[in-house]
Image (tube, rainbow, N blue to C red):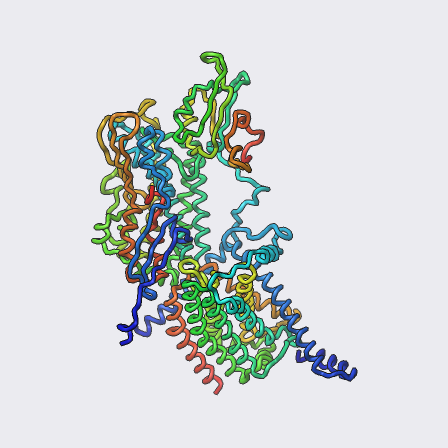
Amino acid sequence: MPGKTNLLADMVLGTWSILQGLAVTLRNIFRPRITLNYPAVRTQVFPRFRGRMVHLRGADGRLRCTACQACQKACPTLAIPLIEGDEKKGREKRARSYVWDSLRCLFCGLCVEVCPFDAIVLGQTYTMVTESRDKTRLELAELLEPEQGGGS
Amino acid sequence: MTASLTPTEHVILNMGPQHPSTHGVLRLELQLEGEVIVGCRPVIGYLHRGIEKIGEARTYQQFLPYTDRLDYLSSASNNLAFVQATEKLMGVQVPPRAQFLRVVLLELNRIASHLVFFATFANDLAATTAFLYGFRERELIMDLFEMWVGARLTQSSIRIGGVAQDVPAGFAEKAREFCRLLPSRLDEYDRLLTGNRIFRARTEGVGLLPPEEGIGYGCSGPTLRGSGVAFDLRRADPYEVYDRLDFAVVTQAACDCMGRYLVRMGEMRESARIIEQCLDQLPDGEVMAKVGRTIRPPAGEAYGRVESPRGEFGCYLVSDGGPHPARVHLRAPSFFHLCALPRMVQGWKVGDVVAILGSIDIVLGEVDR
Amino acid sequence: MNGGLYHSLAVWWAGHHLPPWIFDAVWMVAMAAIVTVFVLVTVLVLVWLERKVSGDLQNRVGPNRVGGRFGPLQTVADTLKLLLKEDLIPQGADKAVFVLAPYVVFVPTLMVFMLLPFSDRWQVQDLNLGVLFVVAISALPVIGLIMAGWASNNKYAILGAMRAAAQGLSYEIPLVLAMACVVVEAGSLQVGQIVELQRGGQWFILRFPLQLAFLVYFLASLAEVRRVPFDLPEAESELVAGYHVEYSGMRFAFFFLAEFTHLFFLGAFCTTLFLGAWDGPWLPPAVWFLVKSYAVVLIVMWVRWTVPRLRIDQIMGFSWKLLVPVGLVSVLLTGLMKV
C-alpha cells in the first residue's frame, strides 16, 4: 500500500496536471477560428491541385487533344472510356468526343504526365456534384476551362 | 460453493465492423468473463479490395496509385516500398536530389500519420478537443502536400527513378515554418494530454507486450519500440539518405500503451529535425532518373522495405520480365500487430480494448489490402 | 412561493366563498407549469451553449445558421427533428416499463427545482427539510435507468444500466457528505436558512473546511450527471451500448432533457449551497443566481471537453477510495470548526 505522502503527492500532482490541461483549452478560446463559412467562403486550392480534368486549348484556339489515346492506355482504372477523333490525319487530327469517368478516376495524374501534347491537366475544381450517376461521366463539352477559378 | 452448481458461460461481445473506435472496418469478437476479457478474435477482410491481384494486371507505373491506398495515412511509405523493390530489380540509380526529397515526403507523412494517431487515440478516450487539435496541425501538412504534389492524402509522388515533381518555390520556407511550429504544439499536447492524470490512469501499465513476444509476432515500428527494442529500419537497413542524417531512434521500455504513445510523440519531433536537415542539405540536380517509357524489370524477385509510421512495410515483387508484375505481395505491419492484439488484451477489461487497439495504431487498408 | 403573492391571492380567493383547495390546486399547477417552462427554455439554452463552448475550445464556430449568426434556434430545430422520428419499441421489450422509464428519470430531476431560491422572493416551496428532500428525490432517477436497461431486452443495455446504477449509487455517499458539511455549517436543512447565512458576501465557499466540501460536491455531482470524466455508462455506446440504446425520437430526447436539467440543477444547487445563491451587489438577485449557476455549468463544460474519461473500475475506486474519505474528513473538520 503506498505511503500516505505518496497518495497526497499523487493527488496534488494529478490535480495540477488536470489544471494544466484546462489552461491549454482555455488559451485556445482566444485563438482564431479555423473553420471556413462554406459555401460563402471557399478554400483556394494551390496551383498544382489535382481536381477535375480540364482540356486545354492551343494558341490557335482549338483544343489540343489529338485523340492519340495515350492517356486512356496510361490510366490505371480505365477512367477514360471513350476517345474518338475526326477524320484528319497526323497533327491536324482533333478529338471529336472524349468521356472522362469522374467516379473511376483516382486523380493520380498519370494521364497528364503521359500526354505528348499537354492537352489535359487536372484542374482546380473540387466540387463535382451531380444528382445522378449518368452525369458523373463528363463529355468533352463539360471538360473545358472553368470560368472562375477554385471550387466549382 | 454454488459456483460449481451454476453453469456459467463466457459472454461473446461483438465489437462490430461499424464502430467509432476500431480505426476502420474491423470486427473483434471478445469473450468476456464478467468484465474481464478471456479471448479475442479479430475478424478482418471487410476492406479487402484485391490490390495484390490487381497488381498482376497493371503496369508498374499504373500500380503505383494503388499502393497509395494501402496505408492511406502515410501513402509515401507504401509508394517507396514498391518503388524500392522495382528499382532493386532494375538497378536504377536515383539522383541525390530525389533521394532527399523522398525523405522529406516520407517524414512529413510520418508526422501526419502520428498526428492522426494522437487525435484518434485521444478521441477514443473521450478527450475530444485533443482530436481537433491534432487535425488542426495536420491541415498544415496537408497544405504542404497540396502545394508540392497536388494531392493531400494519396500523393503517388514517389515514382520509379525519383520523384514526380520538384518542390515549388516557397515550399522550403513553408516547410521550415511548420517544423519550427511543431515542437511548441507538441508541448501543448503534452500539457493537455500526456501528463494528464486520467490519461495516465488509462494507459500506464495497460496492454503489455513483452519484447520477446513482440519480436515473435513480427511486430515492428513504434509498437515494438514501445517495448524497448531499438529496431528502426532507418538505422538497421538504411535506405535513401538516412545514413547521412542525424536523428535518434525513440524507444520506451514500458511495454504499455503509454510507452507506444510516447514513442510516436518523440518520433514526431525527430521527423521535424530530419526534414530541416534535408532541406538544408538539399543538392541541386534532377529529380528523376532516365528510366524510359515502359518499365520492364528483368526477371527476378526483390523485397523493398520501408520504416512506415506503423512499422516495417514491405513489398515483395516477382517479375517475369513482362510489363506487368508476376506477383506483388505487400507485408503490412498492422496485420502482425493485429495478430498480437489478442495477447495484449488478455486479462484486461472491456474498456481497455479501445485504449490498446488505439495504441497499436492499425490501418485496415493495409491489413486487408 | 413563500411570499406575499400567495397570501394576497389566497385572501382574494377566500373572499369569494369558494373552497380553498381549488385555489391551492390551481396554484400548484401554475407553479409547476412555470418551473417546467423555465426548465425547458434552460435546456434549450444549455444545449446551444454546450455546442458553442465546445466550438470555442476547439477553434471552431459551432452552430451559426439557425436563427441568425449565432444559431440560437439550433436546439429547436433538433428537437423538432427528434419529434418527427419513428417511435420504435423493440420486440420483446417490456412495453409499459420501456415507455415509463424516461419519465421516471426526468420527473424527479424536475421536482427538486421547487427548492431553488431564484431570488429572495422567488422560491416555489421552502421545505424545512429542504436538503434532505433533494437527496431523497435525486436518488430516484437511478430506478429509471435500471428500468430503461431492463425493458430494452438488450444484453448490452442492461450491462450499461447496471454500471450507471452502480455509479449513481456510489457517488450518492460523497454527495450527501458534502451536503452534510453545509448543513452542519448552517445548522439547518432549510434552503432559505442556508442562503440567509450567506448574505452580504459571506459565501460558504469562503469559509475554511467548506472548500473541501465544495470540491467533493462538484466531483460527486459530475459523476451523478454522468459527464466526462465519469461518462462511461453513456459513452458505453463506444464499446457496449448504453442504457438508452433502444430509445429513439422523443423518448431519447427525454433522457437528453433529463441530463441537461440535472446539469443545470448541479450548477444551481452548487450556487445555493456554496456560492450564496442570489447574493450580490447592485444586479437584481435573480440575475446573480443565473449568472452564478451558469458559471458553474460553464466550468463543467470546460472540464468535459478537456479531460479523457475514466474506466468504470477507476470511477468506482475514485468514489469509494478517495471522495468518501475526503468527504468524511471534511464533515469532521466542519464539525470541529463549529465547536
Q: In which quarter of the image is the N terminus of chain C?
A: bottom right
Relative to B222, residue C28 above or below: below
- Give percent across and percent down for residue C111: 58, 74
Within the image, what quadrant is residue B256 found in?
A: bottom left
- Residue drawn at x 27%, y 31% is B326
Task: State how many labels appear.
Answer: 0
The outermost residue toward the bottom is: C339
- Give percent across and percent down for residue C206: 52, 75
- Give percent across and percent down for residue C158: 42, 66
* Visible residue check, residue B272: no
Relative to A146, residue B182 above or below: below
Front residue of this view, candidates C197 and B68 = B68
Judged left or right of residue B89, residue B368 is right
- Give percent across and percent down for residue C132: 53, 80
Front residue of this view, candidates A25 and C282 = A25
The outermost residue toward the top is: A89
The outermost residue toward the right is: C16
- Residue drawn at x 32%, y 56% is B257
Judged left or right of residue A113, residue B103 is left
* Visible residue check, residue C20: yes
